[in-house]
Image (cartoon, grey):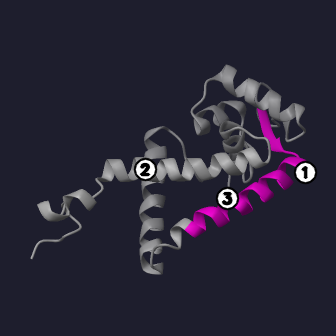
Amino acid sequence: MADASASPPGPAATARYITQVDGLAQLAFVIHGILERRAADHDLSITQARLLGVLRDRRPTMNELGKLLGLDKSSISGLVDRAERRGLVTRIPSAEDRRAVLVSLTDHGRSLVSRTATGFGADVSAVLDLLPAADRDTLSGIVSRLLVAYAATQGVDLFEGL
C-alpha cells in the first residue's frame, strides 16, 4: 500500500487537500498575522518585532543584523536608529573591531520582548495545540532542520553568538 502522506489523495478528497506550497504559505500568513497583532499591541512594526526577537539572545554587529533580517545597510541603520530613540536598543563599540558596532537590547527593550514573546508564544501554542503532541514534536523537528539548512544557504549560522 502506498504512503498516503507522500502524494495527494484520490480525486474524491482533492478538494480537501492543501499542497505543501499552499499549506506553508497559508501557515506563514497565520503566524504573520499573530505576530502583527502582538507587535501592534506594543506599537511595533513587524520589522521592529523581528529586530527585537533577534536581539533577545545575541548581540550582533550591524552587518550581522542585516544578514539575519535580510535588510540592506541603510535599512538596518534606520531600524536601529528608531529602536534606539524609543530606548529599546543601544549600540556598543566592538572590543574586537573598532569599525564594528554591536547592537544590544536595553532593559526596557528586554522587558518589551519578554511581554511580546509571551503573548505570541501563547497564540502560536493555541494553534499548535490543534495537533496531537506527536505531530507537534515532528513538526518542530522538521521546521528546525529546514530553518537551519536554509539559513546556512544564506551564509547565516542561527546558533552563532548564542
**Residue 84 or 28: which is nearer the viewer?**
28
Marks 1 and 3, the one that precedes in the sequence: 1
Q: Secondary structure at mark 1?
A: helix
Above or below, 64 relative to 151: above
Above or below, 94 relative to 146: above
Is residue 93 visible to the viewer in this orientation of the structure?
no
Above or below, 115 relative to 44: below
Cβ atoms at labels 3 and 2 below 8 Å apart: no
* Residue under pointer 2: 26
Which residue is depicted at the point 49% across and 72% down? 130
Q: Main secondary structure of the magenta part?
A: helix
In the rendered structure, which amino acid carries the disc numbered 2? Gln
Q: Which mark, residue 120?
A: 3
Q: Residues within 10 Å of mark 3 (few under 14, many from 20)?
A: some
Q: Residues within 10 Å of mark 2 (few under 14, many from 20)?
A: few
Query: Residues under labels 1 and 3: Cα distance?
Result: 20 Å
Residue 87 lies left or right of residue 23; in this view the side is right
**Residue 130 or 136: which is nearer the viewer?**
130
Front label number (1 vs 3): 3
Which residue is depicted at the point 90% across and 39% down? 87
Q: Which mark, residue 107?
A: 1
Does the magenta-highlighted stretch encompass residue 78?
A: no
Q: Quadrant of the C terminus?
A: bottom right
Q: From the top left corner, tell me how far across and down residue 18 is, in percent.
A: 30, 56
Residue 38 lies left or right of residue 130; in this view the side is right
Query: Residues under labels 2 and 1: Cα distance?
Result: 35 Å
In the rendered structure, which amino acid carries the disc numbered 3? Phe
Q: From the top left corner, tell me how far across and down residue 35 is, in percent.
A: 64, 50
Q: Secondary structure at mark 3?
A: helix
Front label number (2 vs 1): 2
In the rendered structure, which amino acid carries the disc numbered 1? Asp
